[in-house]
Image (cartoon, grey):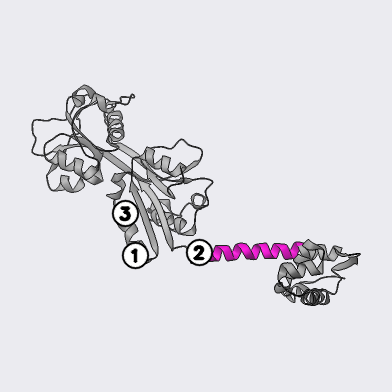
Amino acid sequence: MRWTASDFERLDPRLFRSFLAVVRTQSFSQAATEASLTQGAISQQIAKLEDRLNTQLFVRAGNRVVTTPSGRLLAEYAQGYMDHTSRFLEQLNEEFESMRGLVSYAMPESCIHAPHFGWFLERRRAHPDLALNIELKPSACVIADLLAGMIDFGFVNRAVNNASVHAYPFCCEEYVLAGSASDRQLTAPASLDELLTMPVILYPGMVDCLNLWISCQFAEPDPIGPVALRVMGQFNDIRGALAMVAGNLGVTVLPRHVAAAHLENGALRLFEPATCAGGHAAIQQIYIVRLRERRMPARVKRVIRWFLEMHTELQPVPEEFLR
């Protein structure tokens, strides 16, 4: 007997469930129970398969039935077909439901003041069933939440050295030292020692930004901590710290895009050392991060894709990051 493509075209996949039940149980009666059919219905379906393929699929051996070589070939094909169909339906349903449900992510506060967040909300308006849970946290806390499974993905403003985390370059931030435009007594620091005498305003994550700025401006390799600073105020968010700076309490280091409006209206001014050992802009790479081994729902992949599509230099969207 030579099987052809037309033989398979005439097969009814609805018969595969009963057929595979007989293969597994080696019994028509047990297969009927498993498939919620009568034993007569099982026998009729097997007979249809044998008729259409013109071959015997089972032989009786005492109280059980044994699958023939032709039956074993069909079983391999039928199981593959059922598995493939199941995966296809799962992906199809997942995609259909992809924009329903919750997406959780976290990021440093400066990220919410970048234009990306507004663009993201615009795209989300077309999907009213998509719920969001967004937290503002320093990068170290974002990574900790990611590893604990508390968020789907995140943004961080530092390099990630963890094999469990997949980090992809997203955009860059430039950090600047800013103070009140009305305070003319302060001048740009020419050294780290001069900087440490200046009144400073803290906010979560500010010290990391400051150390990058110091490294770029003064080529100082060793980071400093808050105890080394002349702290004159602190606020638990960057906007509050910005108000303190504008109110003459001190200076702070923050992303240029966060200070942009205050610089344009003249409320703030920048302190840019004219001569220093380093003397280059404090640019930090921002990464979008996810767990390598965690399977992401389609809605999470879609949201990440939206963010990646905001940067034309990332085109085409890196599919390996979304797998």
Q: What is the number of the mark on residue 185?
A: none
Q: What is the number of the mark on residue 117?
A: 3
Q: CA distance from mark 3 to mark 2?
A: 24 Å
Residue drawn where x is 31% and y is 34% of the image = 208
Tell me the residue that label 1 is attached to.
125
The furthest residue to the top = 193
Numbered disc 2: secondary structure: helix
Q: Amino acid at mark 3?
A: Phe
Circles 3 and 2: CB atoms closer than 8 Å = no
Tell me residue 301's x, y (percent): 46, 56
Precedes in sequence: disc 3 or disc 2: 2
Circles 3 and 1: CB atoms closer than 8 Å = no
For residue 119, say whether it is visible: yes
Numbered disc 1: secondary structure: loop
Tell me residue 135's x, y (percent): 34, 48
Q: Amino acid at mark 1?
A: Arg
Precedes in sequence: disc 2 or disc 1: 2
The furthest residue to the right = 62
Residue drawn where x is 76% and y is 61% of the image = 76
Tell me the residue that label 2 is attached to.
95
Precedes in sequence: disc 3 or disc 1: 3
